[in-house]
Image: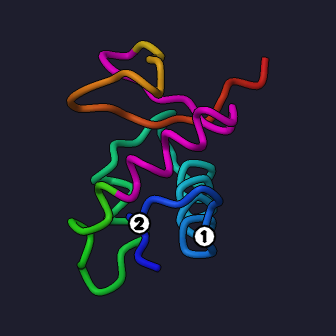
């Protein structure tokens, strides 16, 4: 099943992508990263562009589960209703 296939339950590739996104965010020097920054970090052999849509879908699922936050213009957004350029970050632990 391709990474961007819709499914009722998460597939193994989707879960791997979610884990890769979270690991990349944990290892980042910055508080947030853009989807292209994450794609560059996890892509094999420079094939990062094809990861952008799967990253967005995984980010929405992770945000709905409370495991990451999607930001637009520096503010958290509803994962079910956002457009344009966005950044991803881990939830604050205060």
Q: Name the element at disc 1.
A: loop
Look at the image and name its color scheme.
Answer: rainbow
Sequence-first tag of 2 and 1? 2
Residue 10, given in percent of the width and then of the height, sits at: 62, 61
* Magenta extent: 54-74
Check the image and name the residue furthest to the bottom. 45
Name the one closer to the observer, 16 or 25: 16
Q: Residues within 10 Å of mark 2 (few under 14, many from 20)?
A: few
Q: In terms of secondary structure, where does tag 2 sit? A: loop
Q: Position of residue 9 (x, y in %)?
A: 65, 59
Q: Which mark is residue 36?
A: none
**Which of the two residues, 65 or 75, is positioned nearer the viewer here?**
65
Indicate whether residue 70 is drawn in magenta: yes
Contact, CB < 8 Å: mark 2 with mark 1?
yes
Q: Where residue 85 sits in the image (x, y, percent)? A: 23, 32
Q: Which mark is on residue 5?
A: 2
User: How much space separates mark 2 and mark 1, taking CA atoms?
Assistant: 9 Å
Q: Is residue 53 left or right of residue 70?
A: left
Instruction: In this rendered view, identify the residue nearer to me: 1 or 41.
Output: 1
| Residue 6 vertical position relative to residue 11 in the rendered view, above or below | above
Residue 78 in the image: state x and y as whole percent: 47, 18
Question: Does 69 sit left or right of 85 as displayed?
Answer: right
Q: Residue visible at 45% across and 26% down?
A: 80
Residue 73 in magenta stretch:
yes
Q: Is residue 15 above or below residue 27?
A: below
Q: Is residue 68 above or below residue 75?
A: below
To which residue does mark 1 refer? Answer: 11
Q: Quadrant of the C terminus?
A: top right
Residue 24, quarter of the rendered image: bottom right
Residue 68: image quadrant is top right
Q: Residues within 10 Å of mark 1 (few under 14, many from 20)?
A: some
């Amino acid at each position: 099943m391709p990474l961007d296939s819709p499914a009722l339950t998460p597939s193994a590739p989707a879960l791997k992508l979610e884990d890769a996104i979270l690991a990349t965010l944990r290892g980042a020097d910055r508080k947030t990263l853009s989807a292209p920054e994450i794609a560059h970090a996890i892509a094999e052999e420079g094939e990062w562009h094809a990861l952008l849509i799967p990253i967005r879908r995984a980010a929405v699922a992770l945000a709905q589960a409370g495991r990451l936050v999607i930001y637009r213009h520096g503010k958290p957004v509803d994962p079910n209703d956002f457009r344009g350029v966005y950044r991803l970050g881990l939830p604050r632990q205060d």
